[in-house]
Amino acid sequence: MRASAATAARWSSRVPSQSRLAVPGDAMDENAMTPSIILDPATARALLNGRKTQVRMIAGGGHGMFPIGARIYGREACAPGRMQDGREVLTDLHRAEFVAFADGWRRDCAGQGWQGAVPHDPNEMWVSAVHMPIWACRVMLEVRGRRTERLQDIATQDLRAEGVQPILAGLLWRGARPLPGLHWSARRAFAAHWDVTHPVPGLRWADNPIVEVLDVAVANQAFLPRATCSSSAAVPSTSASVRRLRS
């Protein structure tokens, strides 16, 4: 019933390695020195949907910068794009008018967002999470509580707070989409997701590392960053927005 290692690897390989390691670890905006964490696609979607209200990260990574009340930017791997002749095309960050995330959500430099097709990038033009422009941020978290514990000490209620979902009234469990696989228990589902995003020896579920536990809430959208767009292009028409990104 568990997702195979090969299936999990295919899922995680949809984004660059710096993003799929997603400890989450802190990164700092090169200009604004903005505190942030790296989010994999499943974690970002679960936070936005309100199914995930806790974040665990390896202790000792300089997370003292995240006191209660702090706001943290979520960084994700993304594909930069722009509009050309009424359709979306891939481009570099310097010419980007918007970015597309692994689940197909777009966000432009003016702060507008819309759903489109999942980007397919044959030329490997993905931008790793650590290099995501700050205007592209779609997840800002507010820290409501924090503590330190061993990873395997996670309580039953905290498994749901981490985004694990019951299937068939709890007969089966799954991690947050798009992570594949069904599991016989919530604990196994959480452990499988953790190991996909923390494959390094010493950080895996079986290693039982010390983690920082943050109770978080998605901050008001008004706090998300904006930037001045380089062109007049904004949200494309519906027909354009659902086209695949092409090189």
Image: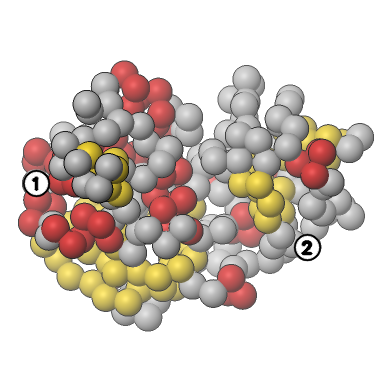
Question: What is the x, y in percent for residue 181?
Answer: 30, 31
Q: Secondary structure at mark 1?
A: loop
The residue that appears at 35% across and 69% down in the rendered structure is 216
Observer-side mark, 2 or 1, equals 1
Q: Residue furthest bottom?
A: 69
Residue type of the residue flagged with mark 2:
Thr
Instruction: Specify how the rendered protein is coloured.
Output: secondary structure
The picture quadrant where one finds residue 153 is bottom left
Q: Give the residue pinned by disc 1.
A: 208
Task: State the image quarter where residue 109 is shown.
Answer: bottom right
Residue 176 place in picture, x, y as percent: 36, 45
Q: Position of residue 108 (x, y in %)?
A: 71, 54
The answer to whether residue 112 is above or below residue 209 is: below
Q: Say which of 23 and 195 sits in front.
A: 195
**142 and 17: which one is in front?**
142
Q: Quadrant of residue 136?
A: bottom right
Q: CA distance from mark 2 to mark 1?
A: 45 Å
45 relative to 114 in the view: left or right: left
Tell which of 156 and 10 is nearer to you.
Answer: 156
> For the residue carrying disc 2, how many other residues have a C-alpha within 10 Å: few (<14), some (14-19), or many (20+)?
few
Quarter of the image containing the C terminus?
A: top right
Relative side of 56 to 118, left or right: left
First along the sequence among labels 2 and 1? 1
| Image quadrant where one finds the N terminus | top left
Inspect this view and state whether residue 201 appears. Answer: yes
Which residue occupies 45% across, 68% down? 218
Q: Residue at x 54, y 46 (%)?
A: 131
* x and y, in percent, of residue 67 in the image: 31, 77
Q: Which residue is mark 2?
A: 228
Who's the residue at 58% across and 70% down the image? Answer: 221
Compared with residue 185, is residue 158 higher up or lower down, i.e. above or below? below
Amino acid type, label 1: Asn
